[in-house]
Image (cartoon, rainbow, N blue to C red):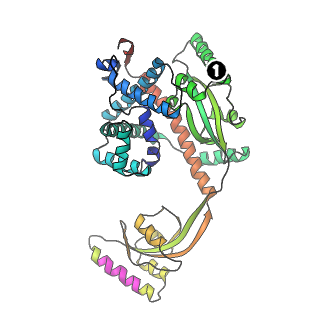
């Protein structure tokens, strides 16, 4: 599924941000008034939404053993998340981006399977943990919609060329760090837009104070939760595992000189101060894949030839092959996959997952030299012959793919940060939380 990679961590994302737990409002809570806590362009955020989202965050932090910040700090963090969510959903609506029930059902089913449970078990787990299944569905719909907006507005603009890949590979190789990945914690302290020298100095003082607390033994995740202006604040500033090529360029020299557990000095960018902590480090590994060299003959249906006609023709070719005729000669003369036909039907070395399931299943069942029975796929009818198999060291190809993904991810994160900041700056947002 196109969302599978993103969905692997999505359950945590929306339970940390917008998942609505079943109402457990206590007497005297603001929930009873359900007042407006923020106006976001033409939308509003109600105290009930903020209370539900805050309870979800508190529950997750308690389960992780993360100390809770002051109520006002946590509430502000969660409200800012809800504001940014609202702005992105408004943009989705204005661009006609929606996630219909069919898409949603497919994603929920895949999410359940990815967690190793049935759909019924998945629903029961949610409700056991205090989450409404219907609220979960709508929260997932929102998150998928936001993913679509970000894909349209940011990801679709990201381009990576071969020269960039070559340059980064060369840099990593020369530094001896090509296969090393780093697990980083990150705190971002933003400088206000068009800040005066006094405001810049005040922000720097705040960042220096934060650094002193960390070096004095304060828990990094707890400080990030309270202090960081980054989108990862509610995750304790955890950036996950990253190659050097995935890191912002301003972090590179610092990270390469750090040991696990080290906390950096302040790192200044044009609009922020940063603090990073090296949480972990892991080294290079060779990457091996199982490959099959295979060839085929493909016959397609069309306006003239029905599926029955094609079956008859492919079975005649099968008989000729089993009678001893040369596969390459028949492929050249008959196969309608013109590219491979010119090579005697040869598809080259294929990795697992490179072909459609029906073709791969038949291919995997064959011994070298063996010819399949006719196999139907979405492309037509095939006769398949496995020529040989090998375990291939694809480290070079794997590294190029990984570096391409790292460059794209780095560019995406940088552009996403700027885009979200512009979106926020260009929107009307009025806080009314103090009036609630």
Q: Spot the residue most to the bottom.
A: 323
Residue 317 highlighted magenta (yes or no) = yes
Residue at horizontal 67 percent and vertical 28 percent from the top: 264
The stretch in magenta equals 309-319
Residue 46 visible to an observer of this rendering:
no
Residue 12 highlighted magenta (yes or no) = no
Image coordinates of residue 101 in percent, x first then y, are 28, 45
Residue position marked by numbered label 1 in the rendering: 213
Instruction: In the rendered view, tell whether residue 39 sits above or below residue 331.
Output: above
Q: Which residue is more in the foreground, 200 or 238?
A: 238
Q: Quadrant of residue 382?
A: bottom left
Instruction: In the rendered view, tell whether residue 430 sits above or below residue 18.
Output: above
Lateral position of residue 300 relative to residue 401, left or right: left
Residue 329 visible to an observer of this rendering:
yes
Image coordinates of residue 153 in percent, x first then y, are 42, 36
Q: Quadrant of residue 10?
A: top left
Lateral position of residue 324 relative to residue 257, left or right: left
């Amino acid at each position: 599924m196109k969302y599978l990679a993103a969905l692997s961590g999505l359950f945590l994302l929306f339970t940390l941000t917008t998942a609505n737990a079943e109402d457990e409002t206590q007497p005297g809570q603001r929930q009873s008034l359900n007042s407006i806590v923020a106006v976001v362009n033409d939308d509003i955020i109600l105290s009930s939404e903020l209370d539900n989202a805050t309870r979800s965050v508190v529950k997750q932090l308690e389960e992780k053993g993360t100390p809770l910040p002051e109520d006002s700090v946590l509430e502000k963090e969660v409200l800012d998340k809800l504001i940014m969510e609202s702005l992105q959903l408004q943009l989705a609506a204005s661009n006609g981006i929606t996630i219909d029930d069919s898409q949603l059902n497919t994603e929920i089913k895949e999410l359940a399977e990815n967690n190793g449970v049935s759909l019924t078990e998945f629903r029961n787990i949610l409700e056991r943990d205090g989450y409404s299944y219907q609220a979960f569905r709508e929260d997932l719909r929102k998150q998928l919609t936001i993913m679509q907006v970000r894909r349209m507005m940011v990801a679709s603009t990201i381009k990576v060329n071969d020269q960039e890949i070559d340059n980064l590979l060369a840099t990593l190789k020369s530094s001896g760090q090509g296969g090393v990945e780093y697990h980083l914690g990150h705190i971002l302290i933003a400088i206000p837009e068009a800040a005066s020298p006094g405001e810049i100095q005040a922000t720097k003082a705040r960042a220096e104070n934060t650094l002193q607390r960390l070096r004095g033994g304060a828990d990094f995740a707890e400080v990030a939760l309270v202090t960081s202006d980054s989108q990862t604040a509610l995750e304790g500033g955890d950036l996950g595992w990253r190659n050097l090529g995935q890191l912002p360029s301003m972090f590179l020299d610092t990270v390469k000189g750090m040991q696990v557990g080290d906390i950096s000095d302040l790192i200044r960018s044009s609009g922020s101060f940063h603090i990073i902590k090296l949480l972990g480090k892991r080294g290079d590994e060779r990457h091996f894949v199982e490959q099959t060299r295979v060839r085929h003959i493909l016959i397609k249906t069309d306006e003239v030839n029905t599926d029955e006609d094609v079956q008859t023709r492919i079975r005649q070719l099968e008989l000729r092959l089993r009678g001893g005729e040369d596969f390459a000669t028949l492929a050249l003369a008959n196969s309608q996959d013109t590219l491979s036909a010119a090579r005697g039907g040869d598809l080259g070395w294929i990795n697992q997952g490179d072909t459609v399931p029906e073709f791969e299943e038949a291919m995997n069942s064959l011994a070298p030299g063996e010819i399949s029975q006719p196999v139907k796929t979405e492309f037509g009818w095939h006769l398949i012959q496995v020529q040989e198999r090998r375990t291939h060291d694809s480290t070079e190809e794997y590294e190029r793919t990984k570096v391409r993904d790292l460059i794209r991810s780095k560019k995406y994160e940088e552009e996403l940060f700027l885009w979200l900041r512009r979106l926020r700056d260009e929107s009307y947002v009025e806080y009314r939380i103090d009036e609630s």
